[in-house]
Image (spheres, rainbow, N blue to C red):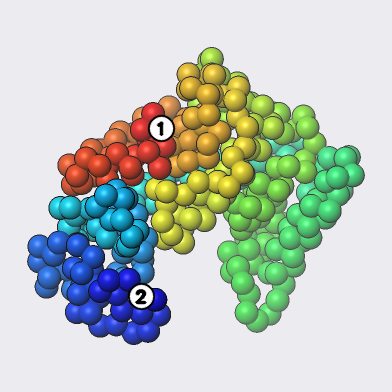
Amino acid sequence: MTKRGEVDMKSFATHDEQLAILKSRGLIMEDEAAARRVLSRDNYYALIDGYKEPFLERDETKNPYGEELYGAGTTFNHILALYQFDRKLRLLLLGELLKFERSIKSKLAYRFSERFSAVDSFLDNANYSPEEVHFHERDRITATLNNLIESHKKRHRVRYPELREFYEKHKNLPLWVLVNFLSLGQITNFYTVIDQDLRTRIAQDFAEEAGDSGITLSAAELDEILSIAFPFRNKAAHEEVLYSFRLRSPLELRRLEDKLHQEKGYITHGTTASLIKLLKVVSPPDEYEMFTRELLELIRSLEESLPEGPYVRVMKVAGFHK
C-alpha cells in the first residue's frame, strides 16, 4: 500500500516525478529548476532519505495516519542545507581523524622500535603481549606486516611501489615505513596486542601532547577512543550520514567525562559530539582550537539556514545540544 502521492521508489522515477512526490508530501519547492539540478547531482536516496527525518511532521493532530508528510513551511532548500552541513561536517571531522590516525601510527612505530631496535623485531612474537588472549590478533598483525615486506619482491603488479623503492634504496623496511600502509582498524588491533608498558607509554605521549596537565590517559581509554574513532572514520570516508550516527554499544569513558567537566553520559552516549569532545585529549591544543572554531562556524551557518524546530532536533541527535 502506497502513501498519499507516493510512487513506488523501488522502480525508476524521473526527476519531475520525484519532485511531484515531494510536493505531494508538503515540501515547498522555491525553485524547481534548481531542485531538479540538485537531484541530477545528488540522488534522491542520498539527499531525501538521508536527511528528511528532522523535517517530518510527527504531531498526530496534524498527521493522524503517520504518513510521510513534511512540517509546515519546510522547503527543499532546508533539506539541502542539512545535507550540505553534513558533507562539510564529514570533511572537517575526517581531517581530524586522519591526523589522529597519523599520530597513533607515528607514536606506535617510534615507541615499538625504540624498545625493540633489531631489524624486523616486529615479526618476533616475543615482542608482543604474553597474554594468550592476544595471540590470534598478534599473529594476524605480524602476518600482515610480513606480507607487506614480501609484496615488494613481486616482479609484476607491485601493489605498493613506494615499498619497493624504499627497500631498493635502504635494503630494509622498518616499522615506521610499514605502519603507513596499515588501516586504522589494523593499527587499533596492533596497539591492543603490544605489551602493557608500551601501551601506557603511547597513551602518555598523547596526554602530554594534548598539553592539559589535568588530564591523563590510560591505555584502556586510548583503546576505547580508537574503537570509537574507527567507525566514525569509515562513515566519514564513505560519505554516509554522519550527524545522526551513534555507536550501538557506547563504550565507558566516565573518568574522562569528569576530567573534561562533562555531565554523566555526555561522552558515553557515542554521538558525533562525544567523539569531537574525545579528540581534545589526543590532539595538540592549537589544532583542536582551530578545529572547534571551524565546527562552531559550521553549526552557526546551519542554525541560520533551518527553522528552529528541525535545527534543535538535528543538534539533539548529534549530541551538540548539551
**Which residue is tagged 1?**
288
* Left or right of 58 in this view: 236: right
The answer, for residue 211, to whether it is visible in the render is no
Residue 19 sits above or below residue 80 on the image: below
Which is more toward the observer, 285 or 136?
136
Kind of residue at disc 2:
Thr
- Answer with the quarter of the image where residue 257 lies: top right
Residue 88 sits above or below residue 20 on the image: above
The residue positioned 77% from the left and 35% from the top of the image is: 115
- Answer with the quarter of the image where residue 140 lies: bottom right
Residue 257 sits above or below residue 143 on the image: above
Kind of residue at disc 1:
Tyr
* Left or right of 309 in this view: 212: right
Q: How many numbered discs, if any?
A: 2
Label drawn at residue 215: none
Q: Is mark 2 on a helix, strand or loop?
A: loop
Question: Of marks 2 and 1, which one's residue comes earlier in the chain?
Answer: 2
Q: Is mark 1 on a helix, strand or loop?
A: helix
The residue positioned 10% from the left and 66% from the top of the image is: 31
- Frontmost of labels 2 and 1 is 2
In percent of width and height, residue 68 lies at: 31, 62
The image quadrant where one finds the C terminus is top left
The residue positioned 36% from the left and 69% from the top of the image is: 45
In percent of width and height, residue 171 lies at: 71, 59
In percent of width and height, residue 240 lies at: 43, 59
In percent of width and height, residue 106 lies at: 60, 42
Which is more toward the observer, 190 or 223?
223
User: Counting other residues with Cα less than 10 Å from the Cα at mark 1, is it few (<14), some (14-19), or many (20 or more)?
Assistant: some
**Do labels 2 and 1 touch, CB within 8 Å?**
no
Question: How far is the residue under mark 2 from the one under mark 1?
Answer: 48 Å
**Which residue is tagged 2?**
2
The residue positioned 24% from the left and 52% from the top of the image is: 62
